[in-house]
Amino acid sequence: MPSHPKAPVELRTAPEEEVALLAALPEVQQASDWLRAAEPKLQRWQMELARIPAPPFGEAARSEWLAQRFRELGLDDVGIDEAGNVLGVHPGALRPTKAGSYVALSAHIDTVFPPESPLEIHQEGNKLLGPGVSDNGAGVTAMLAMAAVLQATAIHPSLPLLFIGNVGEEGEGDLRGMRHIFSQAQWLDSIACNVILDGAGTDVIVAEALGSRRFEVTVRGPGGHSWSDYGIPNPIVTLARAIDSFSRANVPLSPKTSSNVGVIHGGTSVNSIPEFASMRVDIRSTSTDEIDRLERALRLALDQSMELERESRRSIVSVLTAEVVKIGDRPSGELPPDARILCVVRAVDQHLNNSAHVQRASTDANIPLSLGREAVALGGGGRGGGAHTLQEWFDCSGRDLGLRRILLTVLALAGVKE
């Protein structure tokens, strides 16, 4: 008699029970063993990746490297889209439909470091050292580990898995890679849920998107010599007054809010009146209303500084101009407490005896969460530190816990055909 295929393992009852059933499958146990044994390969991938410069808008070389790894690991339909995102598909046992067909697994491939930064990546024992090894070398490596373990074992997810190495998560990238994914009709409705891998660790579940808004403020003037042209308005002084005024704006502890002047440019020499001065400002809050209020405070501080300059020089025609340009706007959002993806991650953590807490942060999850989609951001295991500095490090010890956590989460969301 012909044999009948077993039904997929899906979350139909308590998530804790379903995760335990998944973890007990022989092929899943084999996958756990494989992930532990694959650590040397994962370290090589992580260091190779970190040695490739990938500033925002300059990720092309990393995109090509990742696309080649996707092909080697047997993913289907590997390609690089218009934004530079790398995509590949692990087919599911069930035929996909348009609505909610895919479980997406993503990791951003860009870094905060400019192209000329020294990428001196090296290893000392269990530690990998150098800029970008953890953020987001750890996340991309964890994503590659998932593709590799599916190739090496007999696990057959019911739903297809969409692997995404996305660009533009850091700084001025303003989540452009993930924005592009969700602007495409092909993916907008077909992605059922999103697991984002960002950095190291296993102790955090990012299920709340921290909103932020960023601005470049520029004051311009004719400039001149500090002696012969003395009296011409100085853009740096005007901008400094605006910074002082803006720094006095009320920033509440609740709802938690922050503001930061992170970059200042202007001037050519100590004896030159500068032609321009600019600053970049970051405003973050759990409340959109607070972000709006601080944006108004920023614009008012600049207007008042310009007015003070005009009043102090009534005998001189004012020649200063100013503009405020928005250079980033990350939307906020959060999962409801009973969201399926959140229940799954918590059930996996319970099964693994892993302690983790829900946290609000600004990640690629901002985009799907702001659209009302289910998404979480998880660490890639191990431990990391010194993010966004040249002294960044990643400790590979215990990485396999993070990888098993990701694997069980993805398989629970996708279902598994036994």
Image (cartoon, rainbow, N blue to C red):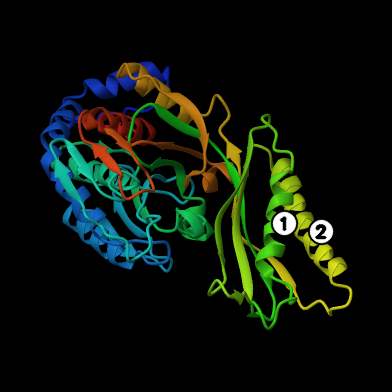
Query: Badge 2, how many Cα within 10 Å: few under 14, some, many 20+?
Result: some
Q: How many marks?
A: 2
Which residue is painted at 68% across and 69% down in the image?
Answer: 235
What amino acid is at disc 2? Gln
79 sits to left or right of 209: left
Query: In terms of secondary structure, where does tag 2 sit?
Result: helix
Q: CA distance from mark 1 to mark 2?
A: 7 Å
Image location of residue 130, percent across then percent down:
26, 49
> Quarter holding the C terminus?
top left
Q: Is residue 45 left or right of residue 113?
A: left
- Which callout, 1 or 2, points at the residue further toward the start of the chain? 1
Residue 86: give x, y in percent of width and height: 34, 59
The answer to whether marks 1 and 2 mark residues whose Cβ atoms lie closer than 8 Å is yes
Which residue is under mark 2?
304
Residue 139 vs residue 267, the one in the foreground: 267
Q: Residues within 10 Å of mark 1 (few under 14, many from 20)?
A: many
Query: Label 1, on which residue?
Result: 242
Quadrant for residue 320, please give it: bottom right
For residue 21, the mark is: none
Residue 69 occupies quadrant: bottom left
Residue that appears at 74% across and 50% down = 245
